[in-house]
Image: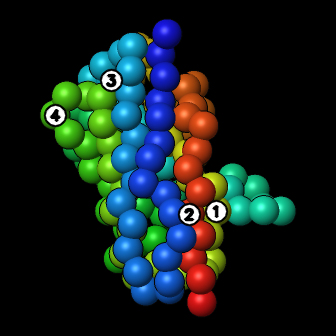
Amino acid sequence: HVQLVESGGGSVQAGGSLRLTCEASGHTFNNNCLGWFRQAPGKEREGIAAVYTGSATTLLHGAVKGRFAVSRDNTGRTMYLQMNNLKPEDTAMYYCAADSLSPTSEISCTLSKSFAIWGQGTQVTVAS
């Protein structure tokens, strides 16, 4: 059974930092696209970061560039989202996702692609 589990969320003051972790069990994601998404109350879910596990190439949404960084470890089972200079508008439930259980191409790794496996989410709350 393949699972993704997010951790590291919490409540911080504006300007603070958090590091989210996404851990996979039951599968190793070699040559896959892993993504971070967030959804605030009353808003649509948005993709904010992605990493292609084969090359460690990363993508970031413009709203978080310069503040967030996405990375993966070498096992193919863990992805991180380092969030710095957090703002109240970053408050949301954060989810990690994987695009497939089969290898996919790096060129297909985008924030708008379809992701097949999702975690349960971790809440991030930023107070002003």
- Residue placed under numbered mark 4 in the picture: 74
**Residue 100 percent location from the top left of the image:** 47, 21
Between tags 2 and 3, which lies in front?
A: 2
Per the model, the C-alpha gap separating discs 4 and 1 is 28 Å
Instruction: State if disc 4 and disc 2 touch (CB < 8 Å).
Output: no
State whether residue 48 is above or below residue 2.
Answer: below
Q: Residues within 10 Å of mark 4 (few under 14, many from 20)?
A: few
Q: Secondary structure at mark 1?
A: strand
**Residue 23 percent location from the top left of the image:** 37, 34
**Residue 18 percent location from the top left of the image:** 39, 66
Quarter of the image for residue 123 reads bottom right
In this rendered view, identify the residue nearer to me: 7 or 40.
7
Q: Residue furthest right?
A: 42
- Between disc 4 and disc 3, whose residue precedes? 3
- Between disc 3 and disc 1, whose residue precedes? 3
Quick check: 40 left or right of 1?
Answer: right
**What is the number of the mark on residue 124?**
2
- Between disc 4 and disc 1, whose residue precedes? 4
Please name the residue shown 49% across and 23% down the image.
3
In this rendered view, identify the residue nearer to me: 96 or 100.
96
Q: Secondary structure at mark 2?
A: strand
- Residue placed under numbered mark 3 in the picture: 29
- Residue 106 visible somewhere in the drawing: no
Please name the residue shown 26% across and 28% down the image.
76
Between tags 2 and 4, which lies in front?
A: 2
Q: Residue furthest left?
A: 74
Q: Secondary structure at mark 4?
A: loop
Instruction: State if disc 2 and disc 1 touch (CB < 8 Å).
Output: yes
Amino acid on which the number 3 mark rests in the picture? Phe
Instruction: State if disc 3 and disc 4 touch (CB < 8 Å).
Output: no
- Residue placed under numbered mark 1 in the picture: 92
